[in-house]
Image: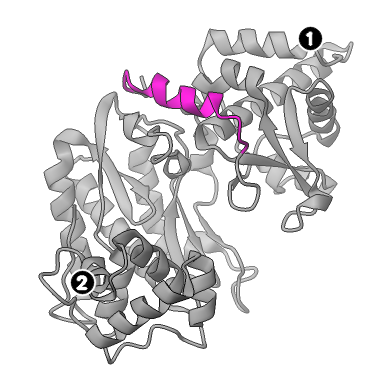
Amino acid sequence: MYTTSDLDTEIAKAVEDIYEPDTDDRQRFPSDLSIEADSFQTQVDEVSKEISSPRQGKYAETQREHLANILLNLSRSIVTRRWTIFFDDSKAYSKGGLMHSAGFTSRSRTTKILDALVASETISRIDGAKHQENPHGSLYYPNRDLREKLYRYGLASTAERSFDKVLVRINEPSRGWRNADLTTIEEYYKIAEVNEYAKAQTWACKEAITRIFRYDPLSSGRLHTEFQNLPSRSQKIRQNTLINGQPIREVDFNANHLRLFLAFNKLDVFGDGTDAYREIANLARVDRQTVKSFFIAALNCDSYERARSGARVPDTFGRRIMDAFERLYPRAQIFNKGRPFGLIGLQLEGEILQIAMRQLRLLDVFSLPIHDAIAVNDKNYDLAKSAMEEAWYDVMKPFHPTAKTFVG
């Protein structure tokens, strides 16, 4: 059991939604997925009628396995509202390649199935040539009829084999890290401990928890698992899932990136400390959500104009926000011509969550990372709140002894 009784209502919104996800920022890579559900095998049988099957038994079985994995990945697309990228490059299907690691060992079988599903208008495709960031991969998303048949399997599918794969990744390795054995670094042992405990737990979209760095093990470094991609605003899917069959609650920091920036620069949060955005919003006479959007962008940009553009904030509001910030924190330099603070912030967030999750594990409390927050069973909320606070102070006190956080 992975969901509450309210979930069907929330997923129905995603199924009924006539709008497809944004191709620019709503994508997912395929995973090697499986599910224990006879009803899913019935769906595989039904869809396979649209695709010519090889005559030889072993090839027919390989095609069926590929079709089942494609359908499970498309079911994940539905519940996460993300396009799935399937690559056409033959190297991706070789051992060690992305598609091979996701369980797709045959390029010809995968291509044949996807082409047939597109031809029958069962799924939509955006060719890689039109999507510049992944020119060798095309984006796929199920059409409404298939969404209605598959959505229930997206949450129940698991990527059990992901726990046996490398748990740390560097996206843009700097010199000295391009061919490094990441299984030998200290961070790997820490994330391996997290996953050893996680393997025995159950949750929606179960998949290994990985740590992803930008250039090296000292840059960025957030924890990641598919669960965090579940919608929580337009459709409250994530909040209505279960951990080990019990309701969950999310434990989150208030204005965490801004607090990390201030503490890193040896500055105290202005006001009573319960809401780092509120004092700026009041002084700027701009709503809190706009202030939040601006700083989320600003801490990842090297100039005011880029921050304002990224946050889609009118210049009048942007300048009022900056004026208020500079009046409250005159010594703070938010824009850095080198690496923006965002990379440092992500690294600090990863450290904080890893420490908090370890402390909870020692209490036999399982937690899942959600960006800079965690999800736990509702009954463990107070324990999780304390663990998050202690982990934050453990990481940030060395930078600024009077630094303060607020967990809600």
Q: Which residues are magenta?
A: 4-20
Instruction: Kindly identify the amino acid type of the residue bearing the numbered disc 2.
Output: Glu
Question: Label 1: how many residues lie within 10 Å, few (<14), some (14-19) or many (20+)?
Answer: few
Displayed quadrant of residue 101: top right
Q: Is residue 206 above or below residue 192?
A: above
Say if the magenta span includes residue 368: no
Q: Secondary structure at mark 2?
A: helix
Residue 299 visible in the shown view: no
Who's the residue at 33% across and 29% down the image?
240
Give x and y (percent) for residue 214: 54, 68
Say which residue label 2 marks.
279
Render colour scheme: one colour
Who's the residue at 65% across and 17% down the image?
145
Residue 49, numbered label: 1
Give x and y (percent) for residue 42: 63, 7
Instruction: Kindly identify the amino acid type of the residue bearing the numbered disc 1.
Output: Lys
Q: Secondary structure at mark 1?
A: loop
- Measure the C-alpha gap from mark 1 to mark 2: 61 Å
- The residue nearer to you, when weighing 396 against 339, is 339
Q: Are marks 1 and 2 in contact (CB under 8 Å)?
A: no
Who's the residue at 61% across and 31% down the image?
73
Displayed quadrant of residue 69: top right
Q: Is residue 300 left or right of residue 327?
A: right
Residue 251 visible in the shown view: yes
Q: Is residue 118 left or right of residue 144?
A: right
- The residue nearer to you, when weighing 149 against 180, is 149
Give x and y (percent) for residue 354: 32, 57
Give x and y (percent) for residue 9: 40, 21
Question: Label 2: how many residues lie within 10 Å, few (<14), some (14-19) or many (20+)?
Answer: many
